[in-house]
Image (cartoon, helix red, strand yellow):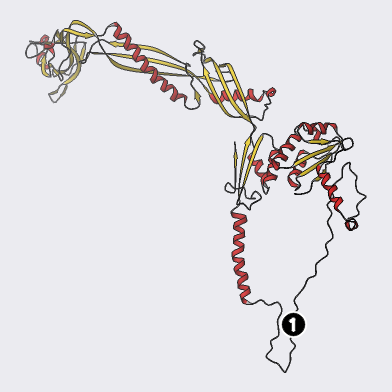
Amino acid sequence: MAKPEKIILTRDDTVKDLLGHVASEDADAITFVIPKSSALAEDDGVFKKLAKVATAMGKEVKIESVDDIILAAAKAAGIYAVNPFFDNDSPSPWQNDVADEKDEKTPQDDDDEDPLAGGAIYATPVVNKIRPQVKPKPVYRPKIQRVEDDDEDDDIVPVRRGIMSRNKWITLAVILIVLVPSYWIAFSVLPRATIAIVTEKKPWKYNGLLTIEKNGPVPSSVITERKNAQMTFPALGKKVVSNKATGKIIVYNAYSSEAQQLVATTRFITADGKIIRLAKNVLIPGAKIDGGKITPSSIEADVVADKPGPAYNIGPLTHLFIPGFKGTAKYAGFYGDIPKALTGGFTGEAAYPTDADIKNAKAKIAGVLDKTLMAAVRAKAGVDYKLVLGATSLSVVKTDVNPQVNAKNEFSLFAEAEMKAVVFKESDLIGYFAAQMKADTDKGFNKDYVFKETTVTYDVPFGKIDFTAGKMSATVDVRGVAELPVDLDEVRKKVVGKSASELKAVLFALPGIESIQVKLWPLYVRHVPNDLSSKKVVFSVE
């Protein structure tokens, strides 16, 4: 265990200097002597940071000062603090250690002490590190025997100094080839560091009424979509009916190049004497005449049977003539073809849509249009805009009922509807409440805090939306967790080459950090690598 240390600070020393001593000194117990009117008295949290760093590094710190403000702040942070001129009755544990050492000294030891008795005098003794003089050890060098040239013994070879044998050079080369790359890999390639930082987090919440409008703090937008649909529904009513068959006819002009007007109810007659009438007026274009050859012109028109009943569900038919032209040249020049059979001719009991059938059908088609329009509004809003439940309005602008039933006794209904929705950007809402949180200084927040996570729930009361003006009032419940962000670029600059204890001392001096975990790998690594690449040093912030 290293001896306790006493460190005398100047008036200008800051919290960084104070924490730097804690990180750099090897002693497990450190006493700081702080002068009156020190700059440390201006920082309310300096001794809390000192206690936090010392606890993290497993060291005991004490304070000596004649400044009552310093002593009060240290004691409030849980640090032992004393005025050396008034509270010097019982020496601190490290002083007892020094006294014990002095008792064990011999007179010979007193003679060997460094006579620096004229130094500064403090209220409590300062540990002086005394380095005993060490006498240099003798260096022994092997004698090299020189052999004198002797004419009588020519077989003796003189010994040459400083020349290595070939085997030694090979051994040295092999050692260098193995050790240098191994050393480089061990201390440059393998070292890794993982630094996990947990920030201090504070909850914040708001629950109340918020007005969202076009020019408000949370601006709104109005989205309008219009869709239509046609659907069939069962006709549940029954009644006796007489329906005439209907269909299409193609009328030909093979008479002249002049157009021919045919009025509604113009008759066409079949080969078996059935009468089919035009439903509307028709203008037949003139025929083409080329070199005396006539190419008939044609036009399609709607027709209806002259009488009701299934007997007129006839066709296809060709060359239906117009009885009104009989006895004239036009009788052969104007005629009609029915390309598909007429349908709908019926006499007897048939299904028809009742008022209840039509009412239910309108409700169902409105529900279908509501879902279709809601999907269209959400697609138009995209991911940027928020559409809350109750912030939409549906209006059916047009309906058209066709009571004629088909073969399945179903009638058809056409409807067109419009939907309006008031939307807003949730990022604008969170930004608005983030500003409210930053201004909430009474609860310890300030402009540097940011939301780490937020949850928002909405309740839109009935009748609180003006879709024309795009204004709505909603009850909003906002719950967030705020933190002081950590500047990782700044952290990277501070951790290069630091040991785990030094790193913690430096980072704990930054505001908003709750805990730090440092892992160095392999086990022999004691400092953060100088290479701060993503593979060498990994940072995480929670």
Measured from the top left, where is residue 107 in percent x and y?
Answer: 90, 56
Decide if residue 145 is on the left or right side of residue 196: right
Image quadrant in which you'd find residue 87: top right
Image quadrant in which you'd find residue 137: bottom right
For the residue pair 210 and 52, the one nearer the viewer reads as 52
Decide if residue 370 is on the left or right side of residue 128: left
For the residue pair 532 and 361, the one nearer the viewer reads as 532
Measured from the top left, where is residue 220 in percent x and y?
Answer: 53, 19
State the residue at coordinates (59%, 61%): 181
Residue 53 against residue 133 in the figure, above or below: above
For the residue pair 316 and 8, the one nearer the viewer reads as 8
State the residue at coordinates (43%, 16%): 419
Task: Spot the residue most to the bottom.
Answer: 152
Q: Is residue 284 visible?
A: no
Residue 79 against residue 169 in the figure, above or below: above
Amino acid type at mark 1: Gln
Task: Spot the residue most to the top.
Answer: 240
Decide if residue 96 is on the left or right side of residue 298: right
State the residue at coordinates (87%, 50%): 103
Measured from the top left, where is residue 481 in percent x and y?
Answer: 60, 28
Image quadrant in which you'd find residue 9: top right
Q: Which residue is mark 1?
A: 145
Measured from the top left, where is residue 513 in percent x and y?
Answer: 66, 36
Total numbered labels? 1
Structural crowding at the residue carrying mark 1, measured as other residues with C-alpha within 10 Å and reported as few (<14), some (14–19) or many (≥20): few
Q: Is residue 396 visible?
A: yes
Q: Secondary structure at mark 1?
A: loop
Can you say which quadrant of the picture contains the C terminus? top right
